[in-house]
């Protein structure tokens, strides 16, 4: 399959009717799969009402079929077509954060969406992306679009069209290139079928921001596990994700301790990588030392995380040691992704 690439300037005021958007939307209506930019990461979109289209998403990613997909919509009216009810807390969160990096879980109406998209659950995860290209494409195709991240399953999520091509060239019909994404980590997933609501995946909207709007919001105690015991209600809850090619270890300790681990592996002849931040990039001696944003601004780490993990692949390291980051604000999302990328491997001084 030839993968077509449409380059779209996201700064244009009204993209609905743009020839590239029209072309990509028709391919989605034909039940083919198209990668599209969002404000978080690139998504791999397909018609959420079509078993055929959703099956193509899973096939392209190599993703297990028991992992539900997030449904992306263009406007609030679409939600009522396939959701049984909208609880008041969900209404408040939508008013505060949609469009934006927040996914909400609702009870779904039967017989509307593909059972493959919801993994057979009686719930559905929905969000409204805050990206002009995604918004225009969703309006143009007039479909609810199921869209996990547009990468091979288990690999770092894509934040540029080049990342998508690296993983999926020849496996999907097309890629809408709208430039680099902004947030860099996926949306926060909140289960609104529980009372109080429960965060199932940390992301671009923090627990503190949610609680400022609706009060108490719990966190799923199984959040940091790499293996779920039951079918997950949200993406990213069951399998290892975001992993670079080389084994990744998180290091809880001093920089001197991390350096000692690096020295030990280099003495064995291994090519070693270190993931740190701009503040400390000059303080390590390793084969590859990469700065992933600034520790003083966790949002910059989130934005650069997946790209940094892919650079380690390009630099062909054989083992990676990463600093850990504060579990506050977007740091919860950063550490969730790193723990999954490491398969839970943490070395403590």
Image (spheres, rainbow, N blue to C red):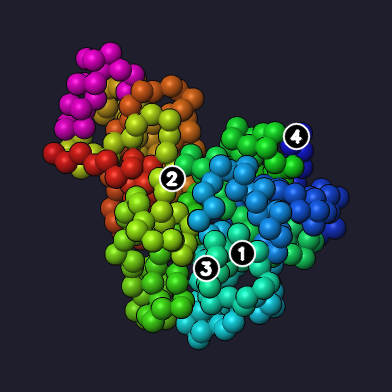
Nearest-to-viewer mark from 3 and 2: 3
Q: CA distance from mark 1 to mark 2?
A: 23 Å
Secondary structure mostly seen in magenta is helix
At horizontal 24% and vertical 21% (from top left) the residue drawn is 265
Mark linked to residue 121: 3
At horizontal 58% and vertical 43% (from top left) the residue drawn is 61
Front in this rendered view, residue 11 or 273:
273
Considering the image in quadrants, where does the N terminus appear?
Answer: top right
Residue under label 1: 115
- Mark 1 vs 2: CB contact within 8 A: no
**Which contiguous range is marked in magenta?**
256-272
- Mark 3 vs 2: CB contact within 8 A: no
Q: Is residue 55 visible?
A: yes
Residue under label 4: 1
Q: Is residue 226 left or right of residue 158?
A: left
Residue under label 2: 241
Label 4 SS: loop
Q: CA distance from mark 3 to mark 2?
A: 22 Å
Q: Whole-percent x and y of residue 251?
A: 23, 39
Nearest-to-viewer mark from 4 and 1: 1
Q: Is residue 288 left or right of residue 172?
A: left
Nearest-to-viewer mark from 4 and 3: 3
């Amino acid at each position: 399959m030839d993968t077509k690439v449409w380059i779209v300037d996201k700064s244009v005021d009204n993209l609905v009717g743009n020839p590239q958007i029209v072309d990509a939307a028709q391919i989605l209506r034909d039940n083919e799969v198209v990668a599209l930019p969002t404000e978080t990461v690139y998504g791999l979109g397909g018609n959420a009402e079509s078993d055929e289209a959703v099956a193509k998403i899973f096939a392209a990613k190599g993703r297990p079929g028991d992992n539900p997909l997030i449904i992306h919509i263009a406007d609030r009216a679409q939600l009522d077509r396939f959701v049984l009810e909208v609880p008041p807390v969900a209404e408040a969160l939508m008013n505060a954060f949609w469009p934006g990096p927040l996914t909400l879980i609702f009870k779904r109406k039967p017989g509307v969406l593909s059972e493959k998209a919801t993994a057979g659950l009686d719930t559905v995860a929905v969000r409204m992306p805050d990206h002009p290209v995604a918004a225009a494409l969703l309006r143009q195709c007039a479909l609810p679009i199921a869209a996990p991240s547009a990468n091979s399953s288990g690999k770092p999520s894509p934040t540029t069209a080049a990342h998508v091509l690296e993983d999926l060239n020849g496996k999907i019909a097309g890629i809408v290139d709208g430039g680099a994404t902004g947030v860099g980590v996926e949306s926060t997933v909140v289960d609104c079928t529980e009372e109080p609501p429960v965060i199932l995946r940390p992301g671009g909207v923090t627990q503190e921001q949610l609680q400022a709007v609706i009060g108490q919001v719990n966190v799923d105690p199984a959040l940091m596990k790499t293996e779920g015991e039951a079918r997950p209600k949200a993406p990213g809850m069951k399998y290892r994700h975001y992993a670079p090619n080389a084994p990744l270890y998180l290091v809880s300790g001093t920089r001197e301790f991390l350096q000692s681990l690096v020295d030990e592996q280099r003495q064995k002849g291994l090519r070693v990588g270190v993931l740190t931040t701009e503040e400390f990039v000059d303080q390590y001696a390793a084969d590859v030392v990469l700065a992933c944003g600034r520790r003083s601004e966790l949002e910059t780490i989130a934005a650069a995380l997946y790209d940094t993990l892919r650079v380690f692949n390009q630099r062909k390291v054989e083992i990676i040691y990463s600093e850990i980051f504060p579990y506050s604000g977007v740091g919860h999302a950063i550490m969730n992704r790193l723990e999954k990328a490491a398969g839970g491997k943490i070395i403590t001084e």
